[in-house]
Image (tube, coloured by chain):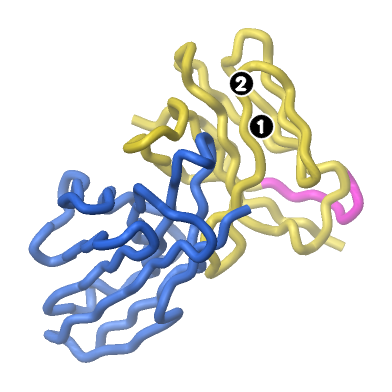
């Protein structure tokens, strides 16, 4: 299957700072990327859908001004958590899709964010 | 509302088959059944998917009932490394914009 990477794998930051998480498709071009958030002992919650070259579509209840998503190329999408607070501490996971993989999405390994 | 219902947890002995059920009584004609799993602190891993025929790959088999209202994922010889949360997801073909929405899943514990 195709490979999706995330960077960093874990990050610790102070409250009020912004954190950028990268999601890269390593061996394919991803026209669409998805961002999920997962709190401890809970399931994955879809945050937004990111299409290359256009604005992201956010799920209901997700603040677009707080979670900035940029999908500037076919291999890279970034999620920036602005003015992070302790309640933003979570496991952030991206997935990627392309028309070559009609019925599969490939997930990254996740990024553990801890806000102090 | 969740499209699927799965038991919250199951145990399986190492080396035995693990049979994970999923109910999807409201599945529509163009929707597939997808199975993913998530090992602790990792991203989800694709296992298998199917529309109406049974499917098999190197990881697992998927048995879908004739009325498509339920399915079973079978891991033929479970190992300790198969301990994970297994998600059954019903969704239209994952064409551009279609999203995978995860429910609570089944925690499978494989024990020696």
Say which element carries label 2: strand
Q: Residue at x 68, y 51 (%)?
A: B108
For residue B43, above or below residue B70: below
Q: Nearer the viewer, residue A97 or A29?
A: A29
> Neighbour class for label 2 at 10 Å: few (<14), some, many (≥20)?
some
Q: Which residue is mark 2?
A: B70
Q: Nearer the viewer, residue A78 or B78?
A: A78
> Neighbour class for label 1 at 10 Å: few (<14), some, many (≥20)?
some
Q: Is residue A7 left or right of residue A100?
A: left
For residue B66, above or below residue B74: above
Boundaries of the magenta span: B10-16
Residue B17 lies in quadrant: top right
Q: Nearer the viewer, residue A10 or A29?
A: A29
Whether residue B11 appears in magenta in the rendering, the answer is: yes
Which chain letter goes with mark 2? B
Spatial separation of the CA atoms under disc 1 and disc 2: 7 Å
Residue A114 lies in quadrant: bottom left
Q: Are marks 1 and 2 in contact (CB under 8 Å)?
A: yes
Q: Disc 1 or 2, which lies upstream in sequence?
A: 1
- The chain assigned the colour yellow in the figure is B
Which chain letter goes with mark 1? B
Where is residue B98 drawn, in percent x and y?
36, 35
Q: Marks 1 and 2: same chain?
A: yes
Whether residue A72 appears in magenta in the rendering, the answer is: no
Q: Residue at x 42, y 66 (%)?
A: A24
Where is residue A80 drawn, in percent x and y?
21, 72
- The chain assigned the colour blue in the figure is A
The label number, if any, that marks residue B21 in the structure image = 1
For residue A6, above or below residue B80: below
Q: Residue at x 32, y 50 (%)?
A: A46
Say which element carries label 1: strand
């Amino acid at each position: 299957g195709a490979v999706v990477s995330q960077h960093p794998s874990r990050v610790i930051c102070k409250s009020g700072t912004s954190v950028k998480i990268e999601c890269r498709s390593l061996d394919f071009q991803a026209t669409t990327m998805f961002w999920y958030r997962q709190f401890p002992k809970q399931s994955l919650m879809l945050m937004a859908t990111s299409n290359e070259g256009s604005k992201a579509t956010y799920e209901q209840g997700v603040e677009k001004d707080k979670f900035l998503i940029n999908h500037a190329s076919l291999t890279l999408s970034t999620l920036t958590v602005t003015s992070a607070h302790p309640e933003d501490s979570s496991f952030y996971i991206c997935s990627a899709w392309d028309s070559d993989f009609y019925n599969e999405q490939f997930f990254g390994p996740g990024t553990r964010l801890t806000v102090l | 509302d969740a499209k699927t219902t799965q038991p919250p947890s199951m145990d399986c002995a190492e080396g035995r088959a693990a049979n994970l059920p999923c109910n999807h009584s409201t599945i529509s004609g163009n929707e597939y059944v997808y199975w993913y799993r998530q090992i602790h602190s990792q991203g989800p891993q694709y296992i298998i998917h199917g529309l109406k025929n049974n499917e098999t790959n190197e990881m697992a088999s998927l048995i879908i009932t004739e009325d498509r209202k339920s399915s079973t994922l079978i891991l033929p010889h479970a190992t300790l490394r198969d301990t994970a949360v297994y998600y059954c997801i019903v969704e239209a073909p994952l064409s551009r914009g279609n999203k995978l929405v995860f429910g609570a899943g089944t925690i499978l514990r494989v024990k020696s």
